[in-house]
Amino acid sequence: MAQAHAPQFKNPVVKWIDSRLPIFTMLDHEYNQYPMPRNVNYLWAFGAIAGIMLVIMIATGLVLAMQYAANTHIAFESVERIMRDVNYGWLLRYVHANGASMFFIAVYIHMFRGLYYGSYKAPREILWILGVLILLAMMATAFMGYVLPWGQMSFWGATVITNLFSAFPLVGDPIVTWLWGGFSVDNPTLNRFFALHFLLPFVLLGLVVLHTAALHVSGSNNPLGIDAKGPQDTVPFNPYVTVKDGFAVVVFLIFYAAFVFFAPNYLGHPDNYIPANPLVTPAHIVPEWYFLPFYAILRAIPDKLGGVLAMFGAIAVLAALPWLDTSKVRSCKFRPIYRQFFWILAIDALVLGYAGAMPAEGVWLLVARIGTAYYFFHFLILLPLLGKLERPLPLPASICEPVLKGGGRVAAGAHAKPMEKA
Amino acid sequence: MRSLKSAILSAAVALGLAGAAQASEAVHIPKQEWAHSGVFGTIDKASAQRGFQIYKEVCSTCHSAKLVPIRTLAGIGFSEDELKAIAAGYEVQAGPNDAGEMFMRPGIPADRFPSPFPNDNAARAANNGALPPDLSLIAKARVGGEDYLYAFLTGFEENPPEGVTLMPGMNYNKYFPGHQVGMPNILMPDGVTYADGTPATVQQQAHDISAFLTFIAEPHMDARKQMGVKVILFLIVLAGLMYATKRKLWSTLH
């Protein structure tokens, strides 16, 4: 895929290290020369944005962990100490708390981009499945992070979600007791959630490394969904995509900063500023917004075990997507019928999210049920059939053909420019 | 143990999975004008200081604010000497001393506001079974925030509407979820005498105490917003430079 020439390093130290451990060659190869299709749009920046969010979360989380105390007696107060007494503690906590939401926003857009442009299709199946695993790891991490402040929603959210496992016959109750480390959500639960909340981001980081490694084997997809045929179709990652992604990251940071500085609690729930109380149940137990579509699916099924299976099934079906979608054409641009169903699915996800925030009764329960049925219909019935029935539009011969109207110059620096700095 | 567990479980599952049936009788909370609202809004220090007076003279007879150090009040314009005087007005338990005994001493600014009751049970015992909530975070812990606090404090009605029977010792409030609340209507016209001469109407008092409670819930709000303006301006300039660089670089491709 990539150009095979080895970089010439001027710095003698870099040269010395590289001849023994070629990390600089690797970096040059994967992040400097890595050929990106020249027609990628700004939706391709959300992978980089999600990566930046992970770094921000780990950095702020590390510092918060130095101040936080995972004990039910003082956890709530220790968070307030961070907010009031730690230098810029309020900033760290709001950056971290809102960062979780921003991470999910970036990842959800990244996923819908993959759905729209068929980025999960051969040869990118493993890349996509690693992405689904990243989503699962994020969900577990975010859920346990929300428990740590030990407010009312922390406690009752933890109680509801861990209780989901009790739906499984025979093993259910022992699993829940094992998760709790006792017979209710209590200090052992908080302690292990803190340990796992610290561990999982590094698992996440490992998955991201694999995700990127898999990406760099097949190369990035692009809005046309056709393979790059040579250097005329691509640009070197650096500087073309670094500066483009960099611009997108900064714009995203403006959006992020607006929440952190001007509406830091908008995405949270007021009940989480009330210390956890096992004897008082909040009127509404709602998860964080990024779980709401899955929460709606959980509640849409009248049976508890069925609901749990449907909720996990909603994610599992994503992992099976490369084989459920039978169309050979990747991009929606050339799939006029699928394109419409893509947007219906996007609306369906938003409707499910809204229904998840509403009490599960009356019209909202019905909406959640229809939304759930449609979600599975889309993946399990529509996609396999559509691939066979739909007549895709003719694909262009190459990426640069529609972009440059018949062949273009090779990007400046595609072959020249060895890496100057390490 | 087992019955408690199953009670909690069934409550959690019923509430979590089936959703709360009640609560959705939406009461509209009117919005108030706050000096601290908006991007450039800052806490009205004079108002918050008056609010502190109400907290001290009225609220704190039943409510604690136990997460708030007294020195926090520097943020609404009290000088160091004033803070020392305010703190010295409180008796704080300290110790144990060399004889192993706890003793009382005058407060210092680093102390947190002492609570009116030694524990929650004592608070309930003195308040007809109701627990007056801690006020440290109350402005962030209620849907509607300071608007809700204002509405709640001005929302008491002497006589409940027809068809509503109050439980013994309860009071009717238009904005409290469920409308029956243990707390009585506490703000009276001229119930406090403001040091700065502001007429102490019920609305004025409700406004001032809500501003104060907003401040103690989020003492760094002004600093946060000021930093936010700088951060966002910086990011906008950076985005402009990045975009210009990107345009220039990519223009060599076409």
Image (spheres, rainbow, N blue to C red):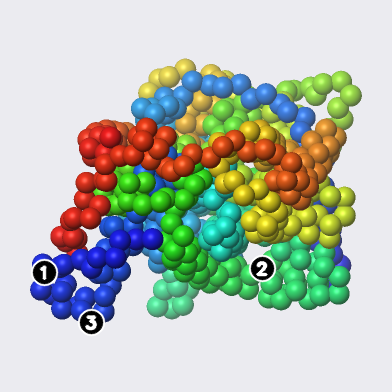
Quadrant where the N terminus of chain A lies? Answer: bottom left
Find disc 3 in the rendering and name its residue. A20
Crowdedness of circle 3 by 10 Å Cα count: few (<14), some, many (20+)? few
Q: Earlier in the sequence, mark 1 or mark 3?
A: 1
Amino acid under disc 2: Asp
Q: Earlier in the sequence, mark 2 or mark 1?
A: 1
Same chain, labels 1 and 3: yes
Q: Residue at x 61, y 21 (%)?
A: B30
Q: Quadrant of residue A386?
A: top right
Residue A146's place in the image compared with A185, above or below, is: above
- State left or right for residue A192 relative to residue A250: right
Quadrant where the C terminus of chain A lies? Answer: bottom left
Q: Secondary structure at mark 3?
A: helix
Q: Secondary structure at mark 1?
A: loop
Find disc 1 in the rendering and name its residue. A11
Q: Position of residue A64 (x, y in %)?
A: 42, 61
Q: Residue at x 10, y 73 (%)?
A: A12
Please state which of residues B80 and A319 is positioned toward the viewer in this rendering.
Answer: A319
Amino acid under disc 3: Arg
